């Protein structure tokens, strides 16, 4: 059943049609029988009328030896009654114009059908009141049938015409009756994924109360569970920051005290750095989660942010002897600067981490009509087709724990990237790099219109950035 | 009016039954219903063309055109029904524990299924529809009789379509385990009934000899009674079938019958393993 309304309309209409048409047929058959009886009655009355008039009139004109011929009716009629008047020995005394000159039936009392003059006739044979002669009254069967049917069809017409009207009424009434279900579905459809407040139970019909209550219970439990999860990951990461910082200091002290530092201390230091990175990533993931994102959207020069990301990661690039290229147009998007920075850092960081030493990396920003396309491309090992959707899952790493890149990571980078992409209503695609091997990540944003004020503000920020960079170099 | 009701009901009911069965099967196999619109369109257009050129068709091939065309249409439907039965049989006999893919038609067979659905329904509709068009065209110049015939046609079509809708929902609500065997039984009987019509058409033009009927069950159910018309529409009931018709009937149901026995035997063998 694809639609309750469709099912009910079709089944109800089918039942109404069957009942209605069965009643119409029953009525038709019954009415035809009744009409038959009435028409027979009319023939008997006709015989009575002939009985009243013909014998007396014949006496007055008894001198006549020929057959009396009654003229045909001058006005048009749908049906007419014809007659023959016959003596006991079968001699025709009188007839109406439409009747033949021979007696049409044997003189046996009763109703029967006879064919003459190319038609089928319904005939009544009855003796006269004085039992000395016979009256034969005849009516064309087709005229009689048509007359009866036209009368009865007047009652059947409305029953047929009523069906579409009944169908429309059923459709409308069911629409009204199912309105609460439609409203409930509409309310649920309109909701944001994060909107978990209770459904309105006011004016809810009894059939839906239980469903709404159960849905509300479920929403409440979900809400509480999400809140717990949010609090836990955020709080845990935040609380871990301080002890990790303390661990870092103690580890540095230990390395200073134990010269040369033993291998286990070096491993301890690596472990602490990895844990610190993980905590920072969890916090970032938490901050960019759509349900408690606190950033502000403003026109952002994405090209500048990309260049800045290259500058920020220059040490890592140098360490692995990668060659970095930058190309593209000056592109502006409406977004959160901090979130976009983490997106770029994560994408570039991944490219640096997973591309073998001396690799090639390119960052491009292109303006394509109303879209801005950010490309991060490398000639590293790439990601197989079948894994490209899964790499966005939290804590998912290609090859699992035995990641063959042997680079530290926690499997959250692309989850953060996906969250930032979703926050900006952008689109991300992972494809084959144009270097022949490796990965090409394409993020498509909607371009932002830039006003003079935005450009000025951006220039101001640029000069501040430049100053900060100069200061850092001097220091 | 009554004649129109009976004639239209008989034609509409047969088409509605076929459509209901095929739609219910689409429902059970989670196939699209879009084929039905296309088949309806082809069927209505085809029936109009058949009615429009009825005299030319009847005069063709030494006056045997109409019968040969009818027999060809019936044969196309029968072959499609047998093919459909062969495709569905493995599903009906699949072990209940198998969810997929043994319990569903392979995706590469979907196109073939849609094609069979369209042939079965549109060809049946063409034949039935053409008879309706020809019947109604007889009242072209008799306004009064035409209105009576139209009312009768509306009543007959209404009853036929309503029964079709109810049959569809009965089948749609049936569990798959019951539906598939019932479906196969009904289409086998339907194909058997149609094969008797093929024999009848060929006997009418003298291609086959019409011997004395095997039996006469008209005293039990007259072909022209309401029940007879209903049985004719459902299983092609004939109260006085000739031996040739009987042979055609057996030849038609044999493939599905043997395939059913083979599948049942294989299922039993698997169960023992």
Image (cartoon, coloured by chain):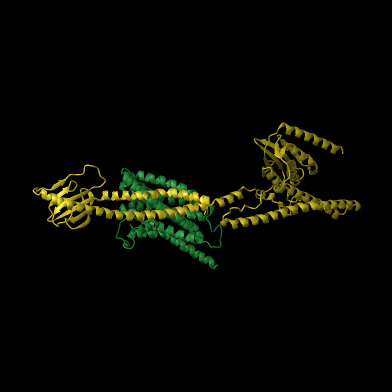
Give the residue furthest to the top: A452
Q: Is residue A300 left or right of residue B9?
A: right
Q: Is residue B48 left or right of residue A276?
A: left
Q: In this view, does B69 lie above or below B93?
A: above
The answer to whether residue A26 shows anywhere in this view is yes
Q: Which chain is yellow?
A: A
Please state which of residues A114 and B83 is positioned toward the viewer in this rendering: A114
Q: The green chain is which one?
A: B
Split into 4 quadrants, where in the image is the C terminus of chain B?
bottom right
Q: Position of residue B4 (x, y in %)?
A: 34, 51
Q: Is residue A162 left or right of residue A323?
A: left
Q: Where is residue A47 in the image (x, y as percent from the top left)?
A: 20, 53
* Residue shown at the point (82%, 37%) measured from the top left: A468
Q: In this view, does A222 lie to the left or right of A238?
A: left
Residue A29 position by quadrant: bottom left
Q: Where is residue A75 in the image (x, y as percent from the top left)?
A: 23, 42
* Residue shown at the point (85%, 37%) measured from the top left: A471
Residue A372 position by quadrant: top right
């Amino acid at each position: 059943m694809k639609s309750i309304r469709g099912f009910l309309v079709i089944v109800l209409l089918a039942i109404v049609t069957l009942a209605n048409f069965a009643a119409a047929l029953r009525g038709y058959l019954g009415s035809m029988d009744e009409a038959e009886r009435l028409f027979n009655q009319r023939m008997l009355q006709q015989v009575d009328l002939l009985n009243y008039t013909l014998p007396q009139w014949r006496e007055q004109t008894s001198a006549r030896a020929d057959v009396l011929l009654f003229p045909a009716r001058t006005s048009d009629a749908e049906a007419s009654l014809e007659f023959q008047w016959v003596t006991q020995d079968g001699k025709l005394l009188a007839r109406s114009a439409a009747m033949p000159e021979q007696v049409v039936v044997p003189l046996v009392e009763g109703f029967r059908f006879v064919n003459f003059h190319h038609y089928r006739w319904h005939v009544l044979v009855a003796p006269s009141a004085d039992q000395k002669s016979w009256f034969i009254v005849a009516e064309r069967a087709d005229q009689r049938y048509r007359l009866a049917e036209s009368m009865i069809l007047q009652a059947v017409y409305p029953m047929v015409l009523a069906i579409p009207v009944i169908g429309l009424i059923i459709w409308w009434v069911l629409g009204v009756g199912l309105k609460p279900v439609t409203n409930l579905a509409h309310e649920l459809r309109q909701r944001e994924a994060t909107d978990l407040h209770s459904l309105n139970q006011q004016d809810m019909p009894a059939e839906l109360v239980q469903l709404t209550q159960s849905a509300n219970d479920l929403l409440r439990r979900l809400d509480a569970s999400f809140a717990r999860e949010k609090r836990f990951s955020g709080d845990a990461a935040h609380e871990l920051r301080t002890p990790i910082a303390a661990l870092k200091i103690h580890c540095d002290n230990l390395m200073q005290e134990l010269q040369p530092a033993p291998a286990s201390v070096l491993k301890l230091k690596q472990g602490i750095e990895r844990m610190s990175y993980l905590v920072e990533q969890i916090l970032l993931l938490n901050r960019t989660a759509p349900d408690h994102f606190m950033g502000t959207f403003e026109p952002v020069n994405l090209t500048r942010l990309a260049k800045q990301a290259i500058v920020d990661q220059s040490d890592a690039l140098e360490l692995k002897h990668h060659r970095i290229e930058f190309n593209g147009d000056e592109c502006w998007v409406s977004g959160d600067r901090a979130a976009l920075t983490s997106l770029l850092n994560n994408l570039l960081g991944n490219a640096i981490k997973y591309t073998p030493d001396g690799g090639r990396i390119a960052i491009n920003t292109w303006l394509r009509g109303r879209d801005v396309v950010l490309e991060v491309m490398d000639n590293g090992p790439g990601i197989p087709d079948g894994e490209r959707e899964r790499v966005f899952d939290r804590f998912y790493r290609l090859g699992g724990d035995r990641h063959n890149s042997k680079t530290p990571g926690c499997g959250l980078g692309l989850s953060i990237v996906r969250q930032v992409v979703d926050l900006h209503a952008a689109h991300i695609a992972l494809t084959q790099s144009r270097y022949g091997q490796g990965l090409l990540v394409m993020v498509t944003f909607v371009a932002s219109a830039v006003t003079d004020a935005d450009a000025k503000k951006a220039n101001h920020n640029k000069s501040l950035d430049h100053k900060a960079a100069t200061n850092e170099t001097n220091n | 009016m009554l004649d129109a009701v009976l004639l239209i009901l008989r034609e509409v009911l047969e088409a509605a039954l076929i459509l209901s069965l095929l739609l219910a099967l689409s429902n059970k196999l989670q196939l699209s219903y879009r084929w039905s619109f296309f088949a309806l369109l082809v069927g209505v257009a085809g029936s109009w063309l058949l009615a429009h050129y009825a005299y030319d068709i009847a005069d063709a091939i030494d006056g045997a055109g109409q019968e040969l065309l009818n027999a060809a249409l019936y044969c196309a439907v029968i072959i499609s029904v047998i093919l459909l039965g062969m495709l569905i049989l493995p599903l009906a006999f699949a072990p209940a524990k198998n969810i997929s893919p043994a319990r569903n038609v392979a995706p590469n067979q979907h196109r073939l299924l849609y094609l069979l659905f369209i042939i079965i329904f549109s060809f049946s509709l063409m034949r039935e529809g053409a008879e309706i068009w020809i019947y109604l065209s007889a009242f072209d110049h008799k306004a009064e009789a035409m209105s009576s015939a139209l009312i009768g046609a509306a009543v007959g079509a209404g009853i036929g379509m309503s029964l079709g809708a109810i049959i569809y929902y009965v089948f749609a609500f049936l569990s798959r385990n019951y539906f598939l065997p019932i479906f196969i039984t009904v289409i086998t009987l339907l194909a058997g009934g149609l094969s008797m019509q093929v024999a009848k058409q060929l006997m009418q033009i003298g291609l086959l000899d019409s011997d004395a009927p095997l039996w006469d069950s008209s005293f039990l159910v007259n072909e022209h009674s309401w029940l007879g018309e209903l049985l004719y529409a459902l299983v092609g009931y004939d109260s006085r079938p000739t031996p040739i018709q009987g042979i055609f009937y057996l030849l038609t149901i044999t493939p599905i019958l043997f395939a059913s026995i083979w599948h049942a035997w294989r299922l039993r063998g698997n169960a023992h393993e």
